[in-house]
Image (cartoon, rainbow, N blue to C red):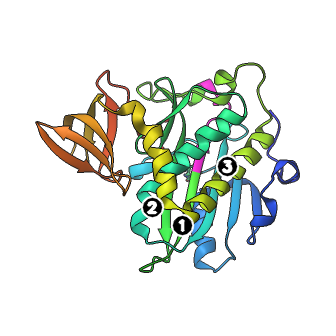
Amino acid sequence: MTSISRERILSSLQAGDLFAGGVHVFDSVDSTNDWALDQLRRGRALPFACIADHQGRGRGRRGRRWLSPAGSNIYMSLGWHFNLPASRLGVFSLAQGRAVVRALNRIGIHDAWLKWPNDVMIGEKKIAGILVETSGVRRDSCNIVAGIGLNYSMPGSAGLDREMRWTDVVHSARGGVPDRNELAAVLLDEAAGLCQRFQASVDEVLKEVESAIDVLKGQVVELGLDDGRWLTGTVLGINGLGELRAEVNGTERVFNSAEVSLRRRDGSRAAGGPC
Ligand code: BTN
């Protein structure tokens, strides 16, 4: 497996000049999101990006861990400043999932789809997850860290949790597997492009995400609450904040990504990492 290389990523990256705070590549960090949050606190110029070959304490949504073996996958975080209220970030984190789908399309994987809130799936298997966190939130602006974990070539031994079905690029690519560094550059370009489009027009990005999430409309799903209960509902769509609208017992209810995980009736879980 080719090692992660800053030179090789930069040579394929189109948006390199955009990153005033640099593109940082590490052999190992605890978590690229933690590194990025720390850099925000220290006042690093924005935007910046960091990519690691290994994470000792990779984090997933809702307090889960994100298995991050060395030499296998892509662990990336972007630091960005938005002149937008933090309340619009529900849409942003969905849209980052869409950016991952676009990156996969560019390398010839056309069957990836976005499952609310921001899991990227191939069939019923998860290939990538997004963790968006904020720092420096003001009324009309915020600094964010957008963390992306993309499974490139997950070792079989990492499938510790048989319940979570995951896949990776190596098993999903048809007609040639792209180099991991080139894919990291494509992913970073798409993620940065999304940040720029999001700042320019949240409503345009919302339209794009609404149509991407259409695949779930009308589906009967189970919604897992923090207290361990599961509700059964029919997906109606998303609202302008990126929250899920679902009909539960004949009443429309709204759920945000911090409160629920989603699974289809057949039991495939939609939130959480490959662990
Ligand atoms: C999820 O689906 O639960 C979100 C997973 C997000 C994982 C990525 S890997 C890069 C970044 N650093 C982290 O610690 N987490 C995110």
Q: Residue at x 57, y 27 (%)?
A: 167
Q: Is residue 18 left or right of residue 56?
A: right
Please give the label number shown on residue 144: 1
Quarter of the image with the N terminus is top right
Mark 2 — residue? 89
> Which-is-in-front pick, marks 2 and 1?
2
Which residue range is magenta in the image?
148-156
Label 1 environment density (alpha carbons within 10 Å; few <14, some 14–19, many ≥20): many
Residue position marked by numbered label 3 in the rendering: 190
Name the kind of residue labelled 1 in the image. Ile
The answer to the question of whether label 2 and label 1 lie on touching residues, with beta carbons closer than 8 A, is: yes
Labels 1 and 3 touching (C-beta < 8 A): no
Q: Is residue 195 above or below residue 38?
A: above
Describe residue 257's horizontal placement relative to residue 183 as left or right. left
Q: Secondary structure at mark 2?
A: helix
Q: Is residue 202 left or right of residue 110?
A: left
Instruction: Please determine whether, in this image, residue 157 is positioned above or below residue 271.
Output: above
